[in-house]
Image (cartoon, coloured by chain):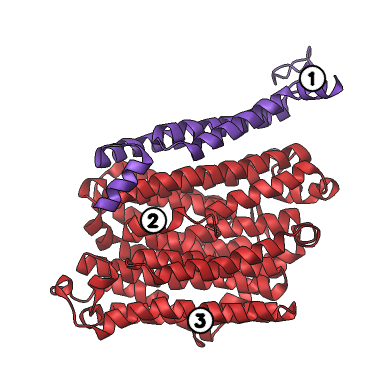
Chain colours: A red, B purple
Amino acid sequence: MQAQLPALQVVLPLIGAVLAALVRRSGPAYVITLVVSLLLPVMSWLLLGQVLNEGPISYVFGDWSRELGIEYRIDAVNALLLVLVSTIGAVIAPFAHRSVAAEIEEGRVAWFYAAYLLCVAGLLGIAITGDAFNAFVFLEVSSLATYILIALGRDRRALLASYQYLIMGTIGATFYVIGVGLLYVMTGTLNLVLIAERIVDVEATRPVLAALAFIVVGISLKLALFPLHVWLPNAYAYAPSFATVFLAATATKVAIYLFVRYLFSIFGVGFVFADLPVGPVLIVLSVAAMFGAATVAVFQSDLKRMLAYSSVGQVGYITLGIALANLNGLTGGLVHLLNHALIKGTLFMSAGAMVFRGGSCAIDDLAGVGRRMPLTMSAFVVAGLGLIGVPGTAGFVSKWYLIVASLELGLWWLAFLIVASSLISLVYVGRVIETAWFREPGKALAEAREAPLEMLAPIWILAFASVYFGIDTDLTAGLAAKAAATLLAGLQ
Amino acid sequence: MTAANEILAHYNQWITIFLMVAGLYIVIARGNMIKKLVGLSLFQTSVYLLYLSAGKILEGTPPIVAPAYAVYTHPLPHVLILTAIVVGVGTLALGLALVVRINEAYGTIEEDEIFARDDKA
């Protein structure tokens, strides 16, 4: 059983998706989703334990050699991603039931869960596979499922957001597959480990440079690197609340994993960061995201849209850590990947709970919501403090690593910019807090009560985690440091 | 003449590049949502050619192992592209389905008209 875990990790949600589509009724479809969501983290934690004790796991399908067949390969980096995606999925699963029932027509609920499980399978697949083309297929599985999830939003603009994401997402995925094709031509293999071995001999050739460019731009579209983020705000704002929670916490993170995997494990630190100016370009774009997207967030009138722009800004911190390309920078980037997933998960779930009770997430309609839904709103405040990076919260830990890494490289101005950009998040989080706690409840919230327990519990578990990992950093920062060390050492 | 020969010798690559750029241009330049999807399909199709060209060997037979033939085309790119075609069909189908729904919701599939209608609402 243990030996088959890598395959089961992906196959289980795939089977779940088919079952959910077959039962067609909302109740059983939800039960299937819940059971699958709760089983997945069991597997991923077992895999992580195995990787930490025994080193990387290799799983070849059908006993084909890795040159011909598909290999799943799990090391300290992607084990972390598997744990993140599956654990978030399990924690937020109870939230789904009432939120989805309230926002989606009864007849479509089972389809929603089927698409959701397909999306989970795709994301886990990207994280677990050791085959470049297989990663493309999973990228498209998760993307197509995501387009469906977004299109199921209540507003007609959800359809438009989904269409625009489909266009940009497909361009991104096609760029990625062009890059993979060029790598395949030059190395004769699709296995990531073998590409990494063979690329050394052909590194300075034009097809490899073109491959790097295509792959970097393609994945950057998927991870919403500024200025390729334009699909994200509308997609997050108009998707059903539960879909937004899941996508914001996991989808961009998995794309970031793929990005890191290519830059560090395949092309190599020396080639990408020493021979080519990828680092400075990434730093400029990251800082632009930290300031630009965050500033746009300040002026949004819709809570979900504001949080979406904030996500673009927060991705900037993660790519900044990647761009610094030293141990502390990469650790900071990866730990922020985890921390941001917890924080944004909490914030979007709180927003979802407010939509569930109040029917709206326009910030003006949320006046006084703190008095009607104190527990939901308190969790929002806790996670909001984490977003700003107040000491004692998870966000502080990631920023600390980033600042240390910048100072190590002598980039004191960058350290200053990291702190300065946090002030912008103070403005937009502060604005919501002011509206929610210090104004009289308006008509929109006359009937609103505290969110039900099955929503509050996931919100508070993630909110608590975002504080806990700000104080006890052994687990998150420890694992991230291990993953960063693995990345810098290259694939073996 | 040598330059012309050089170009002719790689004519498959030039077709690939032309389809790629033409497809991408249509996606960016057209406001009609169906035309955008046509461009997107063209763009994806160019990648099929990129992979298949790489697997083809001149004088090679189809990849069937038989004693009479020694040189045959690499089968792996074909398999990969078969998968990519399925992905492309799936994307196109979903895209068209979305356009149908957008047409039902807005009464148009021109992007600028849709934006204008949303701004009014």
Instruction: Tell me: B7 left or right of A20.
Output: right
Tell me which amino acid carries mark 2.
Asn
Mark 1 vs mark 2, foreground winner is: 2
Whole-angstrom CA distance, mark 1 to mark 2, is: 53 Å
Mark 2 vs mark 3, foreground winner is: 2
Tell me which amino acid carries mark 1.
Val
Which residue bears the numbered disc 3? Answer: A389
Instruction: Tell me: A372 left or right of A134.
Output: left
- Label 3 sits on a secondary structure element that is loop
Is residue A263 positioned above or below B96 on the image?
Answer: below
Local packing at callout 2 (Cα closer than 10 Å; few below 14, some 14-19, many 20+) is: many
Local packing at callout 1 (Cα closer than 10 Å; few below 14, some 14-19, many 20+) is: some
Local packing at callout 3 (Cα closer than 10 Å; few below 14, some 14-19, many 20+) is: many
Which residue bears the numbered disc 2? Answer: A234
Q: How many marks?
A: 3
Tell me which amino acid carries mark 3.
Gly
Label disc, if present, on residue B71 of the rendered structure: 1
Asked whether the residues under the numbered discs 3 and 1 touch, taking CB atoms below 8 Å apart as contact, a structural biologist would say no
Chain bearing tag 3 is A
Nearest the eye: A8 or A237: A237
- Label 2 sits on a secondary structure element that is helix
Chain bearing tag 1 is B
Q: How far from the left and from the top, in percent, is residue A239?
A: 34, 55
Is residue A209 positioned above or below A478 on the image?
Answer: above
Q: Quadrant of the N terminus of chain A?
A: bottom right
Whole-angstrom CA distance, mark 3 to mark 1, is: 62 Å
- Label 1 sits on a secondary structure element that is loop
Q: Is residue A4 visible?
A: no
Whole-angstrom CA distance, mark 2 to mark 3, is: 26 Å
Name the residue at 49% across, 64% down. Answer: A312
